[in-house]
Image (spheres, rainbow, N blue to C red):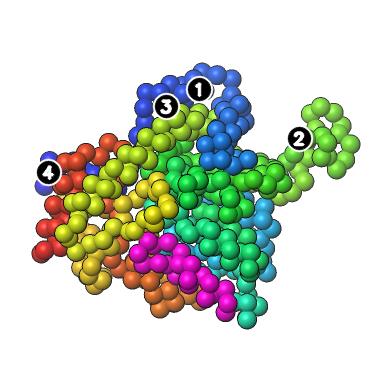
Amino acid sequence: MFNPKPTLPYGRQTISEADIAAVVNVLRGPFLTQGPAVPLFEKAVAEKVGAAYGVAMNSATSALHLACLALELGPDDWLWTTPITFVASANCARYCGAKVDFVDIDPRTGLMSVKALSMKLETAKRNGKLPKIVVPVHLCGTSCEMKSINKLAQEYGFVILEDASHAIGGNYRGHPVGNCKYSSITVFSFHPVKIITTGEGGLATTNDAELAQKMAELRSHGITKDAKRFEHRPAGPWSYEQQNLGYNYRITDIQAALGLSQLQGLDGIVSERNRQIERYRELLAEMPVKLLSIPEDVLSSLHLAVIRLAETEPDKHRLVFEGMRAASIGVQLHYSPVHLQPYYRRLGFREGDFPEAEAYGTNAMSLPLFPGLHDGDQQRVVRTLAELLAA
């Protein structure tokens, strides 16, 4: 049956003529990869967020992996993260052979619960199983309570790796997410549905020169061309050394050029997303749903507009979900709890391990939110949702 209503995705990229021109300029130049656009992009992002160094890669997953390697995570170590995230936040530990555990969420925000983290750390200290790395995830672009998490890091001796895949352009306590004031490394994603895009891509920021150097070398096979760091005398100007086992996680100049252009509009994009969430807040005010809360000391970049249904029955959740999609409204669940994925179940996780995250998985839903979404589109989304909830 023909449906005249256009499909509204939960998110999509916005590409300007300036973005296209920037990419074409690289295509017409001498370097498609390993040229000048990549360091320019790294420098621009680092300056934008107030960090000393930026290291760009082909995905945020790659950046998380190399951040863990740079932080020397290994088979005898633990990494903790939240169950409400994309699987990459946990998988990065498994790539290093490390063990993974999770910390339950604050149901109001969907973010890692500081209270749950504190209690879990007390138990882990008694059992001799403290984490080496904790990965707070800035779900929807909203920063976790980094000052409190950092205080726990100082008390219990773990390192903080911020998964800010959703959060470029956001602020925490008046400072840009990614400045690494409370962490060793922060990772951003530039997937097309994120705040800005490089097509596929990611970037790690840090204030530690050694960590930046490690990640930069590991993204390119573990190779250095810096003769001052060679372990053996160079044979000639062509010489390079592979000093570690690295990967091919490089980003291209084509992607970096797109990212540089997109970065120019970052503040406007975040402002538009915040305007849209306020409109949703007005439209949803009398309905049996709640948007995730944003703490007062946070400016969220609002990658996602997540609501939670008042009813927690999985059947109702599914029926509303299916009804929205049947009406050409591309809702999504961000995310199904990671610990209940088959791979992690085989590692011993079970239903009941993280009850708040599991409850979230039965009633959360991402509504369309992206630059160019009109008020009429939002009204259509909310009107359809209201009809389905009343059915």
Local SS, label 1:
helix
Residue type at the position of mark 1: Leu
Q: Earlier in the sequence, mark 1 or mark 2?
A: 1
Local SS, label 4:
loop
The residue depicted at 45 percent of the width and 67 percent of the height is 113
Residue under circle 4? 2
Disc 2 packing (10 Å; few <14; some 14–19; many ≥20): some
Badges 1 and 3: C-beta atoms under 8 Å apart?
A: no
The residue depicted at 83 percent of the width and 36 percent of the height is 228
Q: CA distance from mark 1 to mark 4?
A: 40 Å
Front: mark 1 or 4: 1
Q: Earlier in the sequence, mark 2 or mark 4?
A: 4
Local SS, label 2:
loop
Badges 1 and 4: C-beta atoms under 8 Å apart?
A: no
Q: Can you give x and y, in whole percent of width and height, for residue 274 in the image?
A: 32, 44
Q: CA distance from mark 2 to mark 4?
A: 59 Å
The residue depicted at 47 percent of the width and 25 percent of the height is 23
Res 338 seen here: no
Q: Can you give x and y, in whole percent of width and height, for residue 268 in the image?
A: 37, 34
- Is 302 covered by the magenta stretch? no
Q: Earlier in the sequence, mark 4 or mark 3?
A: 4
Q: CA distance from mark 3 to mark 2?
A: 32 Å
Q: From the viewer's perspective, is 54 left or right of 349?
A: right
Badges 1 and 2: C-beta atoms under 8 Å apart?
A: no
Q: CA distance from mark 4 to mark 3?
A: 34 Å
Residue type at the position of mark 2: Lys
Residue type at the position of mark 4: Phe
Residue under circle 2? 225
Res 160 seen here: yes
What span is colored magenta in the figure? 104-123
Q: From the viewer's perspective, is 382 left or right of 139?
A: left
